[in-house]
Image (cartoon, coloured by chain):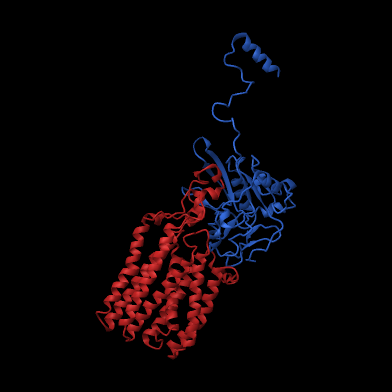
Amino acid sequence: MHPAYSVIFFTTLTGFGYGLIVMYGFALIDPTTLAGKIGYVIALATIGGGLLSSTLHLGHPERAVLAFSQWRSSWLSREGVAAVIGFIPMGLAAFGAIILGENWHILAVVASLLSITTVYCTSMIYAQLKTVHHWATPLTCVTYALFSLTGGYLGAVAIGSFSGHSVKGDAGLALAILVFTWVIKGFWWRRADTDRAPASIETATGLGRFGPVRLLDKPHMTDNYLNREMGYVVARKHALALRRITWILGLGAPAVLLVASYAVSGIAAALILTLAVLSYLAGTFVERWLFFAEARHTVSLYYGQSLENGLEQ
Amino acid sequence: MTSLPDRTDKKLGLVIDLDVCVGCHACVINCKEWNTGGYGSSLADENAYGKDVSGSFLNRVHTYEAGTGQNARVVHFPKSCLHCEDAPCVPVCPTGASYKRAEDGIVLVNEDRCIGCGLCAWSCPYGAREMDPAENVMKKCTLCVDRIYNENLPEEDRTPACVRTCPANARHFGDLGDPTSDVSRMVQERGGMDLMPEMGTRPVNKYLPPRVRNAGCGEGETSKGNEAEPDAQLGGFLKWIDKALEAMK
């Protein structure tokens, strides 16, 4: 599938922002401290920026308001509705904390429930697609939620360290959560590499009764929308190298930095933890890019491409 | 609008005979011609006279080889929207632009509501939807809804452009919800099949598989029994007789 930067920015950034909001709901961040207030600004900015980025993906963004209408059947519509409703308690809680210096915790709880709902809706847009079998698993929803919550927890630890909280124990738990998330993503990749494709060129054409089928001629000389959007092949050659980069940026470097934060204290620890968050975000950005670029669509069958990853070794 | 109708008694659709299609692409051209000037916005082309020409089409013909060795055969394979009963493109649409008509089962896009998110194209296993590069709205086969009900056209033209133009008569249009219709009987007699049935889309359009070849039509037997062919052994007077009698036929 074509990896659109707008959608990658959107899922990575909003995922992190929603994860932060959930940490306010769990009272892991004190919103009345300066760092807590800045955290709210970061959360709202990443969520708002991500949502705006997603509209760049549209052919007619001026009609985006229509996308709230079909929540009864469409996960994309549900995502939009949940995101907009979520802004109400989120915005009020942030207003209370930043302007009035009040901690309206109940609003933060409501906001975090709506945040998780929105992340779930986002993940279901992909998990519902039978046509992309790499995505069509509940594990997709689990990984989206875990990446969001892990990002939020890392953010909470960094924010806590800026507001003078001891972070020694928190960093240890963050390391455990980080490793857990990437182990689950490892399972997701393993499934993507070994899962049997749901269809073949033989069933796609119905010609399997005569034996193996192969494409002789494409219907056109140059690429079309279907090849560009669904038959994206650029990433596959470098998929394994990119996965290594993902592991290093998303897991290795943040893990080392979390451990390193034990060696120092105060502002030095806070800066090291901030670096860990940024590295983790860069890692999830590459992970999200691969999520799209490696995914294979059943329409590829009509163009003689395989649905299997062929990376199992 | 965005949910699928519970049922459609009328199921207008196509039956495509893979035994007959000769791969001439006339259906592709006539579809493009009609739908560029017909229903909805035009079917645009990008860089039409340049090197990387590209454009939106509602119907394309692939060519496959099926089987191996002596049993291999070439199959020309026209593909357009199958107007599925469980069309996955409809419920995913966030705006309600994509819909399936309850009265005749045709799947359409309301272009004034389409935001061009592309999710319907992602959900279609068959690649039946293409984004228009100029209008940024999703285009798909309308079953020539502006022809089949058009009383301004002569009756013989009230059929989809691809069906009307097919020189080999490989494409047929009708109501697949009516078991007595010509198309339904064709499907019944020839074992009409669904594409990718495992996707659970229940396509309305059916494909008639290529027929199994007749025995004895293989290598080295093509001229056997062809008695009109003058024997190569004939010469002189007998050859003249043979020619004269041939002329009297």
Residue at 61%, 45% (x, y): give it. Answer: B27
Chain A is shown in which shade?
red
Which quadrant holds residue B222?
top right
Residue at left offset 35%, top offset 78%: A173
- Relative height, residue A209 to residue B233 (above, below): below
- Give x and y (percent) for residue B158: 71, 49
Q: Which residue extends farthest left?
A: A263
- Left or right of B54 in this view: A154: left
Figure quadrant of the N terminus of chain B = bottom right
Front residue of A174 and B142: A174
User: Number of numbered discs present?
Assistant: 0
Residue at figure coordinates x 42%, y 70% from the top left: A12
Kindly tell me whether residue A237 is visible in this rendering: yes
**Residue A66 position in % (x across, y down):** 59, 70
Frontmost residue, B226 versus B249: B226
Q: Is residue A59 left or right of residue B188?
A: left
Screen quadrant of the C terminus of chain B: top right
Quadrant assignment, res A161: bottom left
Q: Residue B126's spot in the image, x, y percent?
A: 55, 54
State the residue in front, A51 or A71.
Answer: A71
Asked if one can make out residue A62 in the rendered structure from this viewpoint, the answer is no
x and y percent of residue B87 in the render?
A: 61, 59
Q: Residue at x 25, y 81 (%)?
A: A264
Q: Residue furthest top?
A: B237
The chain shown in blue is which?
Answer: B
